[in-house]
């Protein structure tokens, strides 16, 4: 049987549209699987990669972080995955720079420890929203020792427990998730709640129900001027130990609010999706997550599939399918740049 043909949406130069054309069919090395993609998801990072070429190490480039599809080939030493398995996976071109590790193609190499079997009852377009957000959420919650996110910027180290498949008793800890309706914020809320952590979310008023579906005990409106006071009061009433804030938005406005809350409560952790504020008080331990981190391996390995199967982990925010075919990725990137609310943009293949 002749080998299938691969195609990819290539970035040839920063600031230009992706161009769909042939690509080499990747092969699976040790610890890797090749996925025949059925759906890919768009993340805000992809827009920065297209616009400025950030993280691009090799031109032309194939990027993109989230895939769902069927295993086409499993590497020699890979256990737990075989040809034909339905999977979701986190593509890490971001760190390797190799085009075959980018999601925006018909076939992508995924590290086996950043993949999970997708239960039959879940469609590829639903499942594809999960992987990168899971890794970002685990990085926000469960890193124990600070590392380096980028030169001069430490990673945060909240050291909170991993999510559990069991019904968790309260851990006695309270975490604020700023951006509770974002992809990363809502996944962090899901995983934190599954670790027994009391989550107070800050979201748009139209997304209160959504944030609660993800597990938030309380939600406050980011556009409401007294939001800081309300959040501080809610933290006090939660009765738990306040561990800090995960800021999944990370703008000057959210940082000002984070620091106002932390200063009132005697400090704590501030985990951010972008470099943290340059000046923070001594009692605030601030850092930026870098969502390619082995800390997520036990979660992919032991939690994602059974939790999806049991309905404990849900494919949220739900997908908005922009189109079918690699040529729709440019349109999806344009929509992502314009902003989304409690949804993840997806292209099916
Ligand atoms: N460092 C890393 O490793 C890493 C990894 C992944 C992502 N990121 C970054 O994390 C950020 C979030 O990514 P994402 O995919 O989760 O984004 P997203 O889903 O596209 O974010 C959209 C959401 O942001 C919310 N939002 C916007 N402004 C807000 C504010 N002032 N307060 C509260 N919520 C606000 C909106 O909420 P409403 O509609 O409810 O108003 C909307 O639901 C991006 O900047 C991304 O680049 C970093």
Image (tube, rainbow, N blue to C red):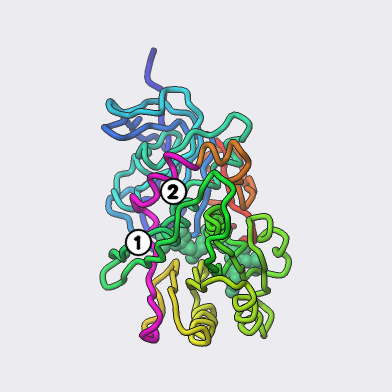
The reply to whether residue 46 is visible in this rendering is: no
- On the rendered structure, is 227 left or right of 45? right
Tell me the CA gap for discs 2 and 1.
24 Å
Q: Secondary structure at mark 1?
A: loop
Please say if 63 is above or below 33: below
Q: Is residue 276 visible?
A: yes
Q: Provide the residue span drawn in magenta.
A: 279-303
Q: Is residue 224 above or below residue 195?
A: below
- Quick check: 76 above or below 329? above
| Label 2 or label 1, whichever comes before in sequence order | 2
**Disc 2 and disc 1 in contact, CB within 8 angstroms:** no
Q: Which residue is mark 2?
A: 65
Q: Which residue is mark 1?
A: 144
Report the front residue among 174 and 202: 174
Q: Residue at x 32, y 64 (%)?
A: 149
Whole-percent x and y of residue 193? 57, 57
Location of residue 148 in the rendering, given as x and y in whole percent from the top left corner: 28, 65
Q: Is residue 204 magenta?
A: no
Q: Residue shown at 49%/42% (left/top)?
A: 303
Disc nearest the viewer among 2 and 1: 1
Residue at 59%, 48% (x, y): give it.
167
């Amino acid at each position: 049987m002749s080998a299938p043909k691969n195609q990819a949406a290539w970035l040839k130069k920063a600031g230009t549209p992706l161009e769909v054309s042939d690509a080499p069919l990747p092969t699976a090395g040790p610890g890797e699987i090749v996925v025949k993609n059925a759906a890919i998801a768009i993340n805000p990072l992809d827009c920065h990669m297209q616009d400025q070429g950030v993280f691009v190490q090799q031109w032309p480039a194939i990027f993109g972080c989230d895939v769902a599809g069927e295993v086409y080939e499993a590497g020699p030493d890979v256990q737990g995955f075989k040809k034909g398995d339905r999977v979701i996976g986190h593509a890490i071109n971001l760190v390797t720079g190799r085009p075959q590790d980018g999601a925006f193609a018909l076939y992508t190499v995924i590290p086996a420890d950043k993949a999970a079997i997708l239960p039959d009852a879940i469609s590829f377009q639903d499942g594809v929203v999960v992987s990168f957000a899971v890794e970002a959420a685990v990085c926000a919650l469960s890193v124990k020792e600070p590392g380096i996110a980028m030169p001069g910027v430490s990673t945060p180290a909240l050291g909170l427990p991993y999510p559990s498949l069991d019904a968790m008793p309260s851990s006695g800890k309270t975490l604020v998730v700023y951006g509770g309706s974002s992809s990363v914020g809502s996944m962090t809320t899901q995983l934190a709640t599954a670790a027994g952590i009391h989550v107070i979310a800050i979201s748009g008023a139209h997304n209160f129900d959504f944030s609660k579906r993800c597990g938030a005990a309380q939600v406050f409106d980011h556009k409401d001027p007294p939001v800081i006071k309300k959040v501080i009061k809610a933290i006090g009433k939660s009765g738990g130990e306040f561990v800090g804030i995960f800021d999944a938005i990370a703008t000057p406005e959210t940082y000002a609010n984070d620091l106002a809350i932390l200063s009132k409560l005697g400090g704590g952790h501030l985990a951010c999706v972008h470099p943290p504020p340059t000046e923070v008080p001594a009692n605030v331990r601030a850092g930026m997550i870098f969502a390619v981190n082995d800390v997520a391996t036990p979660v992919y390995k032991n939690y994602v599939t059974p939790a999806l199967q049991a309905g404990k982990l849900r494919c949220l925010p739900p997908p908005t399918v922009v189109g079918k075919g690699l040529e729709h990725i440019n349109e999806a990137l344009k929509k992502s740049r314009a902003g989304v609310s409690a949804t993840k943009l997806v292209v099916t293949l």
